[in-house]
């Protein structure tokens, strides 16, 4: 219950912050965004691959990535920490080292990892260190946990280009680290927006983010 109260207390400032356009920047107009977002998927590929992203509250991240064509499943959970099988309550203490993340299962013949990176850097503010809006703590850090050398190289190269291009007023602080483990969050966290769309946090915080996301990636939606 306490995590719900915490989310509700954040509604007013978060909604005002979003509506004021405080996080608007030149990212979508940058050459690097255009490069990521126009990459051609691997037409010969036919297997499911996984990307693991931390972008603040995983309820928001999950709801946005579920919209994309080629994404078959999104799971909310925890990665990057030093405690096995943590609970949400434990992670919220900020002492487990874990970040809230989503495992994104996708078909690389339909959507490329580059395109997922474009969506990742769109769905949150990657210049905020250990927070997203009113959600504060290392568990809300911006993070990419790469599964192979190709994912690592692409994440690092694009991050470098974004900072060189000054796509935001401040540098991207996204952590790029090897994937080691994923611990799925409790069932009530899964598919949260779709299951709880009438809740105030979903209505006032997640829905506007999803609407904005859908406008940016209109040609990539299911």
Image (cartoon, rainbow, N blue to C red):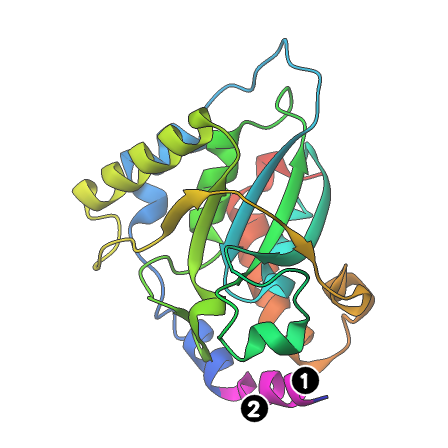
16 in the magenta segment: no
In the drawing, does residue 23 fall left or right of residue 74? left
Provide the secondary structure element on which disc 1 rests.
helix
- Residue 96 position, x and y percent, is 52, 69
Q: What secondary structure do most residues of the magenta stretch adopt?
A: helix
220 in relation to 58, above or below:
above
The residue lying at 76 percent from left, 70 percent from top is: 197
55 in relation to 109, above or below:
below
The image quadrant where one finds the N terminus is bottom right
10 in the magenta segment: yes
Front one among 38 and 150: 150
Is residue 38 among the parts visible in the rendering? no
Q: Quadrant of residue 132?
A: bottom left
Q: Which residue is mark 2?
A: 9
Q: Which residues are magenta?
A: 2-12
**Numbered tag placed on residue 4 in the rendering:** 1
- Residue 82 position, x and y percent, is 52, 60
Mark before the other along the chain sequence, 1 or 2: 1
Q: Do tag 1 and tag 2 residues touch (Cβ < 8 Å)?
A: no
163 in relation to 96, above or below:
above
58 in relation to 199, above or below:
above
- Residue 23 position, x and y percent, is 36, 65
The residue lying at 36 percent from left, 29 percent from top is: 153
- Residue 207 position, x and y percent, is 64, 66
Is residue 55 among the parts visible in the rendering? yes
Give the Cα distance between marks 1 and 2: 9 Å
Provide the secondary structure element on which disc 2 rests.
helix
Q: Quadrant of residue 222?
A: top right
């Amino acid at each position: 219950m306490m995590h719900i109260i915490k989310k509700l207390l954040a509604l007013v400032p978060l909604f005002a912050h979003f509506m004021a356009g405080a996080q608007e920047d030149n990212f979508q107009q940058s050459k690097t965004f255009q490069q990521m977002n126009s990459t051609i998927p691997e037409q010969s590929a036919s297997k499911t691959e996984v990307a693991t992203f931390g972008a603040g509250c995983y309820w928001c991240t999950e709801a946005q990535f579920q919209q994309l064509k080629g994404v078959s499943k999104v799971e909310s959970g925890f990665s990057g920490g030093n405690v096995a099988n943590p609970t949400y309550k434990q992670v919220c203490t900020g002492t487990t080292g874990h970040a809230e993340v989503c495992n994104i299962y996708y078909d690389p013949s339909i959507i490329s990892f580059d395109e997922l990176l474009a969506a990742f850097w769109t769905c949150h503010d990657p210049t905020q260190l250990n927070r997203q809006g009113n959600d504060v703590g290392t568990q809300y850090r911006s993070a990419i946990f790469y599964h192979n050398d190709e994912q690592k190289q692409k994440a690092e190269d694009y991050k470098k280009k974004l900072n060189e291009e000054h796509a935001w007023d401040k540098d991207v602080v996204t952590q790029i680290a090897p994937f080691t483990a994923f611990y799925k969050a409790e069932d009530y966290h899964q598919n949260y927006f779709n299951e709880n769309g009438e809740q105030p946090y979903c209505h006032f915080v997640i829905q506007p983010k999803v609407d904005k996301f859908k406008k940016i990636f209109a040609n990539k939606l299911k």
